[in-house]
Image: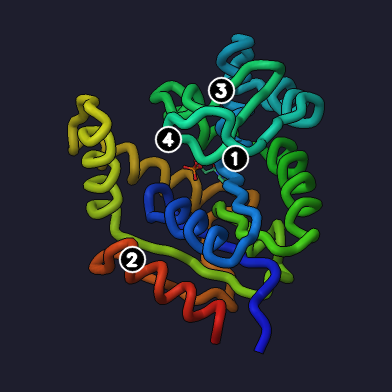
Amino acid sequence: MTTPLIIAIDGPAASGKSTLGFRLAEALGYLYFDTGLMYRAITWLTLERQVGIHDEAAITRLAEEVPIDVSAPSLQDGRVCDVVIAGRDITWEIRKPEVESNVSAVSAYAGVRQALSLQQRRIGLRGRVVMVGRDIGTVVLPEADLKIYLDASPEERAKRRYEEILGRGGHANFDDILVKVIERDRIDSTRAVAPLKPAPDAFILDSDRLDADTVFEKAYDLCKA
Ligand code: DC
């Protein structure tokens, strides 16, 4: 019985992948790598440099040429890592609504996916890693030793996002969030390249009626099975 060295966690937006991935990595002493933040970083840079969101060639060049640095947290403000691009700490910027509403479009571009997947694959193949995203088990690391697809209904995911925003003292409208979650799902799962779907050999965990601790215990059991 050996603990899997490469663990892939995929699933739709706000399904709890990041929480699960972070806890698993901590429990196993592995690197936690959230690939979504790379797509968010390129989206942020696209907006910052006022590159047209439909200019696939220019956005692909950004993904190919501008390094994204992900490192241990330098501040204790709730972050799990620092995200730096072109010398700017954008750890919190990439969570803003303007990034949120454009990231699905940017992550549908084949050239962007190719550039970022290559970097992700190189990091993943070193092993002792929990990599989280949409296409890790299907495209980035199909040889992963353990694949988990974490699912939850759009309503449940919208509810979690809503409560998270209120918990941070922000304002939110549940119906708006639900519409956005459904739209993100549609774009992520119908795009031509690397659409969101479970790998055939993935364990599917439906977290609708499970709290974060139970999801973690189930996933941890899979690691030790
Ligand atoms: O997990 P997240 O919400 O931070 O992801 C942001 C966006 O990036 C989401 O719209 C889907 C995309 N993404 C992707 O296409 N492939 C990945 N491996 C990770 C994220």
Residue density around tag 2, few if under 14, some if 14–19, many if 20 or more, within 10 Å:
few
The numbered mark, 2 or 1, whose residue comes first in the sequence reads: 1
Which amino acid type is shown beneath numbered disc 3?
Ile
Please report contact status of discs 2 and 3: CB closer than 8 Å, yes or no. no
Q: Position of residue 83 (x, y in %)?
A: 61, 30
Question: Residue 216 is drawn in which quadrant?
Answer: bottom left
Which label was assigned to residue 108?
1
> How far is the residue under mark 2 from the one under mark 3?
30 Å
Which amino acid type is shown beneath numbered disc 1?
Ala
In the image, taking residue 155 as reference, residue 113 lies left or right, namely right
In the image, taking residue 167 as reference, residue 195 lies left or right, namely right
Q: Position of residue 184 (x, y in %)?
A: 42, 42
Q: Residue at x 38, y 48 (%)?
A: 14
Which mark's residue is nearer the viewer, 4 or 3? 4
Q: Which residue lies furthest to the top in this view?
A: 50
Q: Name the residue under label 2.
A: 213
Would you say the beta carbon of the disc 1 residue lies within 8 angstroms of ligand 1?
A: yes
> How far is the residue under mark 4 from the one under mark 3?
14 Å
Q: Mark 3 points at which residue?
A: 90
Q: In this view, does 191 lie above or below 59?
A: below
Which type of secondary structure does the marked residue at label 4 adopt? loop
Which amino acid type is shown beneath numbered disc 2?
Asp
The numbered mark, 4 or 3, whose residue comes first in the sequence reads: 4
Question: Residue 67 is drawn in which quadrant?
Answer: top right
Q: Which residue is drawn at 48% across and 74% down?
A: 220
> How far is the residue under mark 1 from the one under mark 3?
22 Å
Please report contact status of discs 2 and 1: CB closer than 8 Å, yes or no. no
The numbered mark, 1 or 3, whose residue comes first in the sequence reads: 3
The numbered mark, 4 or 2, whose residue comes first in the sequence reads: 4
Please report contact status of discs 4 and 2: CB closer than 8 Å, yes or no. no
Q: Where is residue 138 in the image (x, y as percent from the top left)?
A: 64, 64
Which label was assigned to residue 78?
4
